[in-house]
Image (cartoon, grey):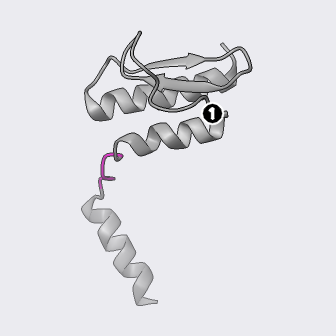
Amino acid sequence: MSARATRATSAVDRLKRRTGNQKYSMSVTGSGHFFISEGAGNPPLCAPMELDDFVAFVNGIAPAAPKRISKLDVAFEKQLTKK
């Protein structure tokens, strides 16, 4: 598998984890463009796109989980702003 397909597949895997919908399916056209559907045989959710556009589209379908911040991170940020 090429690095391009791996990057696109990783984006779809993150989407599956965020939404809990394991049916999302990515396809690649003969010209190397990517598109996604909500399951095999369903209509595509987007027109075929270049890799960067596809990854941005997939990341925009569901919001990413909020980043966890520890108490130490908060204390460190306070120290930085004091100076």
Specify the principal SS of the magenta part: loop
Work out whether 61 lies above or below 1: below
Kind of residue sitting beneath label 1: Met
Mark 1, secondary structure of its residue:
loop
- Residue visible at 62% across and 21% down? 5
Q: Is residue 78 magenta?
A: no
Residue 36 position, x and y percent, is 48, 25
Instruction: Give how far across and how far down residue 76 sits, in percent.
Output: 37, 71
- Pinpoint residue 47: horizontal percent, then vertical percent: 56, 31
In magenta stretch: residue 66: yes
**The quadrant where residue 35 appears:** top right
- 83 sits to left or right of 64: right
Give the side of residue 8 with respect to residue 14, left or right. right
Residue at image coords 61%, 41%: 53
Position of residue 83 relative to residue 22, above or below, is below
Q: Residue at x 44, y 30 (%)?
A: 45
Magenta span: 64-68
Residue in front for this viewpoint, 15 or 27: 27
| Residue at 50% in and 32% down | 46
Q: Which residue is mark 1?
A: 49
Query: Who is closer to the viewer here, 42 or 62?
Result: 42
